Image (cartoon, rainbow, N blue to C red):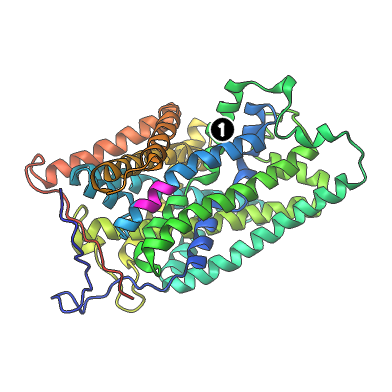
Amino acid sequence: MASHQNTGIAVSGSADGHKPHLRRSLKLWNLIIIGMVIVQPTAPMGIYGVISNKAHGHVVTTILIAMVAMLFTAISYGRMARIYPSAGSAYTYVGQEMHPSLGYVVGWSMVMDYLLNPLICTAFCAKAAMNIVPGLSYYVWILLFAAFFTWTNLRAIKTSARLNEAMCLGMVIVVVIFLAGVVQMQWHVHHDPGFFTHPFYQRELFRLSDLFAGTSVAVLTYIGFDAVSTLSEEVENPRRNIMLGTVLVCLIVGVLSALEVYAAQLVWGAKPFASNQVESAFALLSRDVGGVVLFQLLNCTLLVANMGSGMGAQLAAGRLLYGMGRGNALPRSFFGVLDKKHFVPRNNIVLVGAFAVTGAAILEYFANRLGGGAYEIGAEALNFGAFIAFMGVNVAALIHHGRSEKRKNLSGFLVPALGFLICAFIWIHLSHTAMALGVVWMAVGITYGAIRTRGFRADLVTFDIPEDQD
């Protein structure tokens, strides 16, 4: 196993002491806001119709079950960040606790997740913008959005944090307007008390198998919370704040999402949505609440939400690639360097932006011929890499507790074990398309690793765990 000693790239007195390093300028509040923007305060709106149809109206129940499920993994991330406050996140955790080669495999799977997230956000924003300004083509829009995301992330980390705060505030305000509209709509409507419990449970429509099917989709509400851990080298007191930030992002988004879908179900009930209404289900029912004005406001909000998610995902992807490049899992001369002015991994950010444009264009080209769209194809494949990383972090947390913790306790075993089992259950039930794309991606990565190490006969990666310097 690799050494656990701190060998950060900017340790005072070392040969590398004058090289640029990631600066610890983010406070806990900044971390939570960035996490919320990546996950999106409006996360359940896009998948509301799918969950409602699968779970026969029990959307709020599936959202709360999914929140509890993801909290197990969030706690594992937080525990590992206390030990390894590194930008490499799951790549470092698994590589240190299990084996460097397994860390590389997890890191490679994360790269798929972190590259696809900006891609699908770019594609979604382009489609949404075409509804507002139809004169520009899809291909022009993806170029504009990717360029904007890249420009934003090339600025210092505090610039990105301030922009995220403004976007998060705007999204929360729209959610509050929607909730207020529902309260006003239901205020003078007299129902029996049971009406207000129907979003949680309706006996005549409740089936456990349908609830699990809905929960497997509801988990998508929380995808992206792990990006908080990739900012470990840019946050103050990471051994405390990464744990708090990761868990609080899941909790806040979960509670906010539950309120959103609870209000939506009071308006819509358990009525099924037609197949051509599923994607726009939440916006459609908002028209019943606030008319055309709220309908258009929510459409614009979803555009802003995906812009924020795209920028945040690109931010996290740049840090992951930097951690892997610094550890020599990827070519250090390109991926493991920082811009000397803004102290950001410039090469990685530009690469992710270029990949988003190219990938969104290629997927759309083939999707138009095969049916579907770039957003749908990318979204299906994103979870493949995400859940490999989730499973890896839970196993790493389990091993660390069993091997290193002086005081053994039940939660130290139970939390990561439950986190792993839940993630494994979801992963094996991914679509055939996601599995096929994921297998191809992993085959490419393992082949690259084999070539780089002459058949894995040499060390594949090393790990740098920086000190908690400011």
Q: Residues within 10 Å of mark 1 (few under 14, many from 20)?
A: many
Label 1 SS: helix
Q: Which residues are magenta?
A: 75-79
Residue tagged 1: 215
Q: Is residue 355 left or right of residue 107?
A: right
Q: Is residue 116 visible?
A: no
Which residue is at 56% across, 54% downward? 306
Point out the residue furthest to the front here. Answer: 407
Q: Nearer the viewer, residue 358 or 435?
A: 435
- Residue 159 image point, x, y percent: 48, 73
Q: Is residue 89 left or right of residue 161?
A: left
Which residue is at 26% across, 68% downward? 467
- Residue 274 image point, x, y percent: 71, 29
Q: Can residue 98 be found in the magenta stretch?
A: no
Q: Main secondary structure of the magenta part?
A: helix
Q: Nearer the viewer, residue 429 or 277?
A: 429
Q: Is residue 54 visible?
A: yes
Residue type at numbered disc 1: Thr
Quadrant of residue 333 in the image?
bottom left
- Residue 411 image point, x, y percent: 41, 41
Which residue is at 62% across, 33% downward? 51
- Residue 107 image point, x, y percent: 29, 47
